[in-house]
Protein backbone atom coordinates (compact mmCIF):
# COMPACT_ATOMS: atom_id res chain seq x y z
CA UNK A 1 0.00 0.00 0.00
CA UNK A 2 1.45 3.41 -0.96
CA UNK A 3 0.66 6.11 1.52
CA UNK A 4 -1.14 9.24 0.33
CA UNK A 5 -0.64 12.92 1.14
CA UNK A 6 -3.71 14.72 -0.21
CA UNK A 7 -4.20 18.48 -0.20
CA UNK A 8 -7.60 20.17 -0.38
CA UNK A 9 -7.33 23.77 -1.49
CA UNK A 10 -11.06 24.36 -0.87
CA UNK A 11 -12.25 27.68 -2.35
CA UNK A 12 -8.72 29.06 -2.54
CA UNK A 13 -6.39 29.49 -5.47
CA UNK A 14 -5.95 31.64 -8.56
CA UNK A 15 -3.70 30.97 -11.55
CA UNK A 16 -0.84 32.77 -9.78
CA UNK A 17 -0.93 30.15 -7.03
CA UNK A 18 0.24 27.48 -9.46
CA UNK A 19 3.71 28.75 -8.54
CA UNK A 20 3.23 26.79 -5.30
CA UNK A 21 2.64 23.62 -7.30
CA UNK A 22 5.82 24.15 -9.27
CA UNK A 23 7.74 24.75 -6.05
CA UNK A 24 6.29 21.58 -4.52
CA UNK A 25 7.31 19.52 -7.54
CA UNK A 26 10.78 21.05 -7.57
CA UNK A 27 11.28 20.18 -3.89
CA UNK A 28 9.75 16.67 -4.17
CA UNK A 29 10.26 15.51 -7.76
CA UNK A 30 9.97 11.78 -7.00
CA UNK A 31 8.12 11.23 -3.68
CA UNK A 32 7.93 7.70 -2.30
CA UNK A 33 4.30 8.30 -1.29
CA UNK A 34 1.47 9.45 -3.53
CA UNK A 35 0.93 13.22 -3.53
CA UNK A 36 -2.44 14.63 -4.55
CA UNK A 37 -3.69 18.20 -4.80
CA UNK A 38 -7.39 19.03 -5.11
CA UNK A 39 -7.62 22.63 -6.32
CA UNK A 40 -10.86 24.43 -7.15
CA UNK A 41 -12.30 23.07 -10.41
CA UNK A 42 -11.25 26.24 -12.23
CA UNK A 43 -7.60 25.29 -11.78
CA UNK A 44 -7.65 21.55 -12.53
CA UNK A 45 -6.70 21.81 -16.20
CA UNK A 46 -4.08 24.49 -15.54
CA UNK A 47 -2.60 22.47 -12.68
CA UNK A 48 -2.48 19.40 -14.93
CA UNK A 49 -0.53 21.44 -17.48
CA UNK A 50 1.75 22.89 -14.81
CA UNK A 51 2.75 19.50 -13.40
CA UNK A 52 4.34 18.46 -16.70
CA UNK A 53 5.58 14.90 -16.33
CA UNK A 54 5.81 15.01 -12.53
CA UNK A 55 4.00 12.29 -10.55
CA UNK A 56 1.62 14.78 -8.90
CA UNK A 57 -1.98 13.56 -8.76
CA UNK A 58 -4.84 16.02 -9.21
CA UNK A 59 -8.37 15.77 -7.89
CA UNK A 60 -11.69 17.57 -7.70
CA UNK A 61 -13.36 18.60 -4.45
CA UNK A 62 -16.87 17.39 -5.29
CA UNK A 63 -18.87 15.99 -8.19
CA UNK A 64 -22.50 15.56 -9.14
CA UNK A 65 -23.97 12.07 -9.18
CA UNK A 66 -25.11 12.39 -12.80
CA UNK A 67 -22.88 12.23 -15.86
CA UNK A 68 -24.47 15.33 -17.36
CA UNK A 69 -27.70 17.26 -17.74
CA UNK A 70 -29.59 20.24 -16.37
CA UNK A 71 -27.67 20.86 -13.12
CA UNK A 72 -26.51 24.46 -13.24
CA UNK A 73 -23.27 25.07 -11.43
CA UNK A 74 -22.51 21.40 -10.84
CA UNK A 75 -19.65 19.34 -12.25
CA UNK A 76 -19.81 15.72 -13.42
CA UNK A 77 -17.08 13.28 -12.46
CA UNK A 78 -16.50 12.73 -16.18
CA UNK A 79 -15.74 16.46 -16.55
CA UNK A 80 -13.19 16.34 -13.75
CA UNK A 81 -11.49 13.42 -15.42
CA UNK A 82 -11.57 15.19 -18.76
CA UNK A 83 -9.84 18.20 -17.17
CA UNK A 84 -7.01 16.05 -15.81
CA UNK A 85 -8.25 14.75 -12.45
CA UNK A 86 -7.73 11.19 -11.25
CA UNK A 87 -9.41 11.61 -7.85
CA UNK A 88 -12.37 13.43 -6.32
CA UNK A 89 -13.23 14.22 -2.71
CA UNK A 90 -16.84 13.37 -1.81
CA UNK A 91 -18.71 13.96 1.43
CA UNK A 92 -16.36 16.57 2.89
CA UNK A 93 -17.96 17.93 6.06
CA UNK A 94 -18.15 21.38 4.45
CA UNK A 95 -20.27 19.85 1.66
CA UNK A 96 -22.33 17.86 4.16
CA UNK A 97 -22.80 21.00 6.28
CA UNK A 98 -23.07 23.77 3.68
CA UNK A 99 -25.12 21.79 1.16
CA UNK A 100 -26.98 19.30 3.32
CA UNK A 101 -25.40 16.29 1.66
CA UNK A 102 -26.64 13.02 3.15
CA UNK A 103 -24.83 9.69 3.25
CA UNK A 104 -26.99 8.55 0.33
CA UNK A 105 -25.98 11.59 -1.73
CA UNK A 106 -22.32 11.01 -0.90
CA UNK A 107 -22.63 7.36 -1.88
CA UNK A 108 -24.16 8.37 -5.24
CA UNK A 109 -21.26 10.76 -5.82
CA UNK A 110 -18.72 8.06 -4.98
CA UNK A 111 -20.46 5.77 -7.49
CA UNK A 112 -20.26 8.55 -10.07
CA UNK A 113 -16.54 8.85 -9.40
CA UNK A 114 -16.12 5.12 -9.98
CA UNK A 115 -18.23 5.27 -13.14
CA UNK A 116 -15.90 7.98 -14.48
CA UNK A 117 -12.76 6.09 -13.52
CA UNK A 118 -11.85 8.39 -10.63
CA UNK A 119 -10.69 7.40 -7.16
CA UNK A 120 -13.29 8.58 -4.62
CA UNK A 121 -11.97 10.02 -1.37
CA UNK A 122 -14.94 9.53 0.95
CA UNK A 123 -14.86 11.81 3.99
CA UNK A 124 -16.56 11.14 7.29
CA UNK A 125 -16.21 12.23 10.90
CA UNK A 126 -18.05 13.21 14.04
CA UNK A 127 -19.05 16.64 15.32
CA UNK A 128 -17.89 17.88 18.70
CA UNK A 129 -21.34 17.22 20.18
CA UNK A 130 -21.23 13.65 18.92
CA UNK A 131 -17.75 13.11 20.37
CA UNK A 132 -18.78 14.57 23.72
CA UNK A 133 -21.80 12.28 23.74
CA UNK A 134 -19.52 9.27 23.27
CA UNK A 135 -20.99 8.56 19.82
CA UNK A 136 -17.83 8.90 17.68
CA UNK A 137 -17.45 5.26 16.66
CA UNK A 138 -21.17 4.82 16.05
CA UNK A 139 -21.36 7.97 13.89
CA UNK A 140 -18.26 7.12 11.86
CA UNK A 141 -19.40 3.52 11.32
CA UNK A 142 -22.80 4.77 10.20
CA UNK A 143 -21.29 7.24 7.73
CA UNK A 144 -18.94 4.55 6.42
CA UNK A 145 -21.84 2.15 5.88
CA UNK A 146 -24.02 4.80 4.25
CA UNK A 147 -21.48 6.71 2.17
CA UNK A 148 -19.25 3.99 0.75
CA UNK A 149 -20.81 2.12 -2.19
CA UNK A 150 -20.77 -1.66 -2.57
CA UNK A 151 -18.37 -1.41 -5.51
CA UNK A 152 -15.62 0.17 -3.41
CA UNK A 153 -12.17 -1.40 -3.68
CA UNK A 154 -8.70 -0.50 -2.52
CA UNK A 155 -8.01 0.75 -6.03
CA UNK A 156 -11.01 3.06 -6.44
CA UNK A 157 -11.70 4.34 -2.91
CA UNK A 158 -9.86 6.10 -0.10
CA UNK A 159 -11.50 6.86 3.26
CA UNK A 160 -10.68 10.09 5.09
CA UNK A 161 -11.50 10.29 8.79
CA UNK A 162 -11.98 13.98 9.47
CA UNK A 163 -13.46 15.00 12.82
CA UNK A 164 -15.58 18.04 11.96
CA UNK A 165 -14.34 19.92 15.02
CA UNK A 166 -10.70 19.45 13.98
CA UNK A 167 -11.05 20.95 10.50
CA UNK A 168 -9.48 24.37 10.26
CA UNK A 169 -9.46 24.84 14.04
CA UNK A 170 -5.94 23.84 15.04
CA UNK A 171 -7.49 21.20 17.28
CA UNK A 172 -6.78 17.50 16.80
CA UNK A 173 -7.90 14.35 18.56
CA UNK A 174 -5.29 12.62 20.69
CA UNK A 175 -3.16 10.06 18.90
CA UNK A 176 -4.99 7.33 20.83
CA UNK A 177 -8.34 8.69 19.64
CA UNK A 178 -7.14 8.69 16.02
CA UNK A 179 -5.90 5.12 16.42
CA UNK A 180 -9.22 4.05 17.93
CA UNK A 181 -11.30 5.41 15.04
CA UNK A 182 -8.93 4.12 12.35
CA UNK A 183 -8.97 0.67 13.99
CA UNK A 184 -12.76 0.64 14.07
CA UNK A 185 -13.02 1.78 10.45
CA UNK A 186 -10.53 -0.86 9.31
CA UNK A 187 -12.54 -3.53 11.12
CA UNK A 188 -15.80 -2.34 9.57
CA UNK A 189 -14.23 -2.35 6.09
CA UNK A 190 -12.93 -5.88 6.60
CA UNK A 191 -16.35 -7.09 7.76
CA UNK A 192 -18.09 -5.59 4.76
CA UNK A 193 -15.58 -6.07 1.96
CA UNK A 194 -13.32 -8.87 3.21
CA UNK A 195 -9.74 -9.13 2.06
CA UNK A 196 -10.44 -6.84 -0.91
CA UNK A 197 -10.45 -3.82 1.38
CA UNK A 198 -7.20 -4.64 3.15
CA UNK A 199 -5.29 -2.16 1.01
CA UNK A 200 -7.90 0.63 1.13
CA UNK A 201 -6.15 3.71 2.45
CA UNK A 202 -7.47 5.36 5.61
CA UNK A 203 -6.38 8.99 5.84
CA UNK A 204 -6.59 11.26 8.85
CA UNK A 205 -7.66 14.85 8.23
CA UNK A 206 -8.11 17.86 10.51
CA UNK A 207 -5.45 20.45 11.31
CA UNK A 208 -2.52 18.36 10.06
CA UNK A 209 0.54 20.64 10.05
CA UNK A 210 4.28 20.17 9.64
CA UNK A 211 4.51 20.32 13.45
CA UNK A 212 2.19 17.36 14.14
CA UNK A 213 2.42 15.32 10.92
CA UNK A 214 5.18 12.93 12.02
CA UNK A 215 3.34 12.03 15.23
CA UNK A 216 0.06 11.46 13.39
CA UNK A 217 1.74 9.37 10.67
CA UNK A 218 3.28 7.16 13.37
CA UNK A 219 -0.22 6.17 14.56
CA UNK A 220 -1.12 2.59 13.64
CA UNK A 221 -3.65 2.48 10.83
CA UNK A 222 -3.00 5.99 9.46
CA UNK A 223 -2.14 5.64 5.78
CA UNK A 224 -1.72 9.33 5.02
CA UNK A 225 -3.51 12.63 5.46
CA UNK A 226 -6.08 14.91 3.91
CA UNK A 227 -4.75 18.41 4.48
CA UNK A 228 -6.62 21.68 4.08
CA UNK A 229 -4.94 24.93 5.09
CA UNK A 230 -1.41 23.56 5.20
CA UNK A 231 -1.66 22.31 1.60
CA UNK A 232 -1.79 25.81 0.14
CA UNK A 233 1.90 26.58 0.52
CA UNK A 234 4.57 24.35 -1.00
CA UNK A 235 6.87 24.66 2.00
CA UNK A 236 4.22 23.50 4.48
CA UNK A 237 2.72 20.77 2.34
CA UNK A 238 6.19 19.64 1.29
CA UNK A 239 7.13 19.21 4.95
CA UNK A 240 4.04 17.04 5.46
CA UNK A 241 4.94 14.98 2.37
CA UNK A 242 8.45 14.53 3.78
CA UNK A 243 7.03 13.40 7.13
CA UNK A 244 4.87 10.81 5.36
CA UNK A 245 7.81 9.58 3.32
CA UNK A 246 9.78 9.12 6.55
CA UNK A 247 6.95 7.34 8.40
C1 LIG B 1 -9.91 19.56 5.23
O1 LIG B 1 -10.46 20.51 4.73
O2 LIG B 1 -10.13 18.42 4.78
C2 LIG B 1 -8.99 19.79 6.33
C3 LIG B 1 -8.52 18.74 6.96
O3 LIG B 1 -8.69 21.08 6.63
P1 LIG B 1 -7.54 21.60 7.66
O4 LIG B 1 -6.30 20.78 7.36
O5 LIG B 1 -7.35 23.04 7.32
O6 LIG B 1 -8.03 21.35 9.02
Image: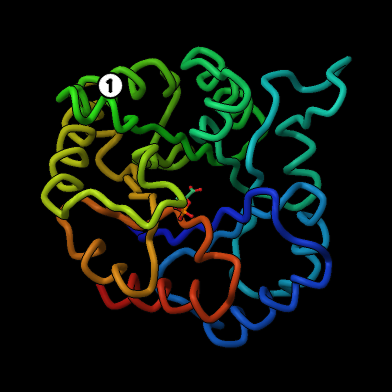
Q: Residue at x 54, y 41 (%)?
A: 119
Q: Nearer the viewer, residue 131 or 51?
A: 131
Left or right side of 211 for 44: right
Q: Residue at x 56, y 16 (%)?
A: 105
Q: How many marks?
A: 1
- Quarter of the figure with residue 246: bottom left
Which scheme is used to colour this image of the protein?
rainbow
Is the C terminus in the top left, top right, bottom left or bottom right quadrant?
A: bottom left
Q: Nearer the viewer, residue 143 or 1?
A: 143
- Quarter of the figure with residue 162: top left
Q: Secondary structure at mark 1?
A: helix
Residue 61: image location, x then y, percent: 63, 42
Residue 147: image location, x then y, percent: 43, 21
- Quarter of the figure with residue 212: bottom left
Q: Residues within 10 Å of mark 1 (few under 14, many from 20)?
A: some
Left or right side of 170 for 186: left
* Residue furthest to the bottom: 27
Left or right side of 124 for 233: right
**Cβ of mark 1 under 8 A from ligand 1:** no
Q: Which residue is mark 1?
A: 139
Residue 33: image location, x then y, percent: 41, 68
Left or right side of 206 for 87: right
Residue 192: image location, x then y, percent: 25, 20
Q: Residue at x 51, y 19 (%)?
A: 107
Q: Residue at x 25, y 29 (%)?
A: 189
Depicted 4 relative to depicted 28: above or below: above
Is the N terminus in the top left, top right, bottom left or bottom right quadrant?
A: bottom left
Amino acid sequence: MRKLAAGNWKMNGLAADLAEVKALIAAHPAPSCEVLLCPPATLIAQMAAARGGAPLLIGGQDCHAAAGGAHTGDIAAEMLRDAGASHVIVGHSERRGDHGETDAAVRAKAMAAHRAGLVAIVCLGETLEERRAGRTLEVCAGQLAGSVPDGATAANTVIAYEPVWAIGTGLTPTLAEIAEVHGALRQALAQRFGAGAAGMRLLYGGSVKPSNAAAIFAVAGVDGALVGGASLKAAEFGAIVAALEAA
